[in-house]
Image (spheres, rainbow, N blue to C red):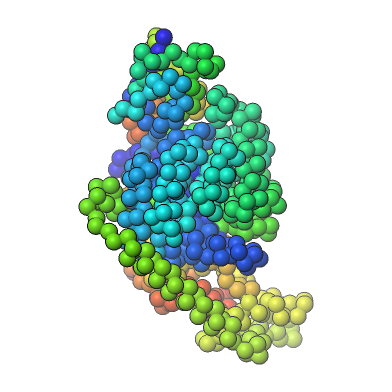
Amino acid sequence: MALEIIDSCTSCQACLPLCPNKAIVAAAPHFLIVADLCNECAGDYDDPQCASICPVEGAILDELGRELNPPGSLTGLPPALAALVAAASPSEVVGK
Amino acid sequence: MDHHLTGQSGSGSCSGSGGGCGSGAPGLDALGEDVRRKVAEHPCYSEGAHHHFARMHAAVAPACNIQCNYCNRKFDCSNESRPGVVSEVLTPDQAVLKTLAVAAAIPQMSVLGIAGPGDPLANPERTFAVFRELAVKAPDLKLCVSTNGLALPEHVEELARLKVDHVTITINCLDPDIGAKIYPWIFWNHRRVRGREAAEILIAQQQKGLEMLVERGILVKVNSVMIPGINDQHLAEVSRHVRAKGAFLHNVMPLIAAPEHGTYFGLTGQRSPSPQELQALQDECAGDMNMMRHCRQCRADAVGLLGEDRSSEFSLAKIAGMEIDHEAALARRVAYRAKIEAEAAEKKARAHAVPPAAKIKQVIALHPRPANGKETAPATSSDAPVTSIALAAATTPSAPPAQPRPALIAVATEGGGIINQHFGHAREFLVYEASAAGVRFIGRRGVDLYCAGEDSCGDDGESKLTKTLRALAGCEVILCSRIGIDPWRALEEAGITPNSERALEPIEEAVLATWQELAASGRLNAPAPQLRRA
């Protein structure tokens, strides 16, 4: 049972001090979770801490590869638009 | 050119805007002497200081504990100079190094702020590490933070201990129902809290933090982002409220939102306020409180005098090769400040040296009132002392005749308090209102807000001149050092008079003299021209 940080992470460091298991590594180009250390905060908090502060939708996955913060869940944007922003070739987003 | 998704920043520090600079203040005289002294050298807080002093934001605080709908910090763009946007996040050690390098190269440097790109107090170890180090290595620098306020109460003691005497809190509302439309979530007590509940907690923390800072004698400025249709009707109340609690300045900034910023507001078509709407709200709030109108909404790593961003000169690679004599640099800064102080004292002495009799005489000359009650063109006198104009309003007996109306006059300047910029080089203009009551600073108008790119940076290919004309809407004269013939014609067609005859004159004196000329011409006895679509 462990979470995973993927490449949409912006390395903003918000999760780093929150992890009760010190499972997060400030790696480059983006942060990583050491799977052996992560227990999804079981026993410490109701919610996994990294996924509770992460500002980027889709950046943290559970062990089944599901997004803890799916498109639209943090921004309030319609999911399809949020997914487009997350995918991020900026010029594609600029619909005039 | 390429578009970049970028974020306005958000959070407090980035503060919504305004990376924490502020300004202004026609009413500073009403503040106590100690407050005046504190802001005198602060380029963000004092309208007078921003011509002469520089500040730097150290981008050491990437984490944030809230989300604002005007922020998407995922993206950076080297053409963006907006709050919350930063090119290079620094470690505390790097930030100290960079601050010292900037302070050695720019003797005007007087303020080091931490404003993001996230929230300084969501990164307390990093933020306070920088402050502790600089308190030893550059003790003359003022330290300030700009925060969204969520974590403020728990850090007030440490801020006081480190002698941080300026704190900016971004307060966009007092009403949690309004807050729920601005803040989708906060991180609080190990949970992500959403909606109205989140806004309620944030607002309570902001207000508590404000009270605690004021109790300890720490200067508090409040930033608000004006969001049409959401909090624009509410901000006058915010202004009254924070003033009553002891905030010394309120800085109302326009929302920055465009689709390419990738923010909720940008992507959902939330519009920004027009310069006129912003000014109207600032005027409404100014009735209650000092307003800061020269804020340039700097990005979180901005370096330099307000309105100029020299951060690219001080990248980590560049400062690594600099050899710096820190003691000599400190001495240069101290000497610079002494010089500015002496100049200010001299200016003040000159202003007070005009004998009262001369002032009264000048008033009479300016406002002849013929028996038919119609105003004739007032005479002007080129050596009219500046102070006489202000006196006119005060000494004119009641039931005054129609006076020449006020006029908005724009200025192109590179700093130093004088008119010294070529029209074509200006990326922003300072706008002043001149009237019989004197000259007051209204605000700055950006030409192409937050983009330093090509002449046409945008899908619509709008020319820089078109944008400039729009930025100058409502102004009757633009004062600059030089101007080309094509823009001259375009300005005249738009009803704005270009004027380069006052190059190198002090701004306020030149604005006043220009208004006097307009008044003498009779142009100000007619109603203000209709705004034309540039």
Identify the image quadrant of residue A10. Answer: top left
Q: Position of residue B9 (x, y in %)?
A: 46, 41
Q: Position of residue B463 (x, y in %)?
A: 36, 53
Above or below: residue B314 compared with residue B327: above
The image quadrant that residue B379 belongs to is bottom right
Residue at left offset 55%, top offset 82%? B349
Task: Using the image as rendered, state which of residue B527 and residue A31 is in the foreground.
Answer: A31
Query: Which of the 4 image quarters holds residue B25?
Result: bottom right
Q: Quadrant of the N terminus of chain B?
A: top left
Residue B303, x across and y down, in percent: 38, 54
Name the residue located 24 percent from the left edge and 55 percent from the top edge.
B322
Q: Is residue A87 visible?
A: no
Question: Seen in the image, is B402 located left or right of residue B129?
Answer: right
The residue under the point 34% across, 22% down is A32
Q: Is residue A60 above or below residue B72?
A: above
Residue B485 visible? yes
Residue B262 coordinates in the image, percent (x, y): 43, 34
Q: Nearer the viewer, residue B185 or B189?
A: B189
